[in-house]
Amino acid sequence: MAGINHREALAPIVTDVVGPNAVSVDREAKFPREAVEAMGRAGLLGLTSAEEVGGSGGGIAEACDVIGEIGAHCGSTAMVVTMHYAAALVIEAFGTRELRERIAGGGLATLAFSEAGSRSHFWAPVSSATADGDRVRLDANKSWVTSAGEADVYVWSSRPMQAEGMSTLWAVPAAAEGLASPAPFDGLGLCGNASSPVKADGVMVHTDDMLGADGGGFDIMMGTVLPAFSAFSGACCGGLMRGTIEATAAHVAGTSFEHLDGSTLADLPTIRAYVARMQLKSDQVAALLADTLAAMGAGREDTMLRVLEIKAAAGEASTEVTDLAMRVCGGAAFRKEVGVERRFRDARAATIMAPTTDVLYDFIGKAVIGMPLF
């Protein structure tokens, strides 16, 4: 799949699969398996995998393109892909060749970091990893795992076995004995992303399944996962905003007042002003995302600040834009067919998904003042 044009490969999948299935994915809380399989066949799940293992050799910017385009049509599918790319980057950097080839060939990965014991402080697992010869026993209560029971492999965190440090990462096959998802996802938004708790009760993995060094998980989380995940979250929110604006514009342009000689909602200056505010918010996030990617690519001194800012800004903006869309579309926004209320619900996840917006505000403040984040 080396050298694929990700935009060309994605376009028919969005048109024929993601878009048409978005309503049923949400309404039936149905995992977007058809879209995932189509992306696997097209080489898009291997977008960030190296060409030497059969991937496309793309980077974070290309992945953001894919996530943003999907997010404009289906938030649930975009979140599944967001978590996949974040996990795939870790696997590409630290996984075995066999595992890297599996992801490049269309395997679905996801992150399993957040735990009941440390909640949104994903960088501080309380679960255990116990050495048993060349095997390791994992026990954990993961609180939120996107694609739970649907992914092929989890990038899993635990406390170190023996080394100093905060965490160690593992590649855990989803089919491993001892893994269980105790409850299906039943939430406000992103209903099809299969985000559920996952319990590990004596799950056995091999020492070769360790990703990086024992005790080195925190550095991987901060150096690989956080920058990518923040950018991906910004792209996901950006897509949601674009989709919301398109749906809102179509509604106001096509809704007329028969008793006022057929004038439309778009003829009202107040409506146009609200739509303008929505567009400004969306464009501001797009500009910040572009600068974040530029900072990451150039290794600028302000890279971490931008990484922290993009997720916080995009999460806040997407809730504001979808709030405005509900106001602009009025009573019609509460109906499913307008396409606003689904995005209104989906957008709520960004502010409370770890690292939460409130945690990010604290980190941003520390970065600006010159204090250490931890």
Image: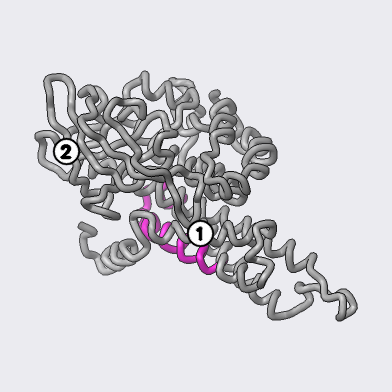
Front residue of 147/86: it is: 147
Front residue of 38/258: it is: 258
Question: In the displayed structure, would residue 270 be above or below residue 123?
Answer: below
For mark 2, does the 10 Å Cα neighbourhood hold few (<14), some (14 to 19), or many (20 or more) residues?
Answer: many
- The quarter of the image holding the N terminus is top right
Say which residue appears at 63% left-offset and 56% top-offset. 243
Left or right, residue 95 beside residue 345? left
Q: Dot 1 corresponds to which residue?
A: 347
Q: Is residue 40 visible?
A: yes
Left or right, residue 131 beside residue 170? left
Residue 194, magenta (yes or no): no
Q: Position of residue 348 (x, y in %)?
A: 47, 61
Q: Amino acid at mark 1?
A: Ala
Say which residue appears at 78% left-offset and 66% top-offset. 253
Contact, CB < 8 Å: mark 1 with mark 2? no
Q: Position of residue 267 (x, y in %)?
A: 79, 76
Left or right, residue 227 beside residue 121? right
- The quarter of the image holding the C terminus is bottom left
Farthest-out residue, front: 183
What whole-number distance in Å separates the C-alpha atoms at marks 1 and 2?
33 Å
Mark with earlier residue (1, 2)? 2
Q: Which residues are magenta?
A: 293-321
Q: Secondary structure at mark 1?
A: helix
Left or right, residue 302 beside residue 73? left
Q: Dot 2 corresponds to which residue?
A: 128
For mark 1, does the 10 Å Cα neighbourhood hold few (<14), some (14 to 19), or many (20 or more) residues?
Answer: many
Quarter of the image holding residue 280? Answer: bottom right
Question: In the displayed structure, would residue 35 be above or below residue 288?
Answer: above
Q: Position of residue 270 (x, y in %)?
A: 69, 80
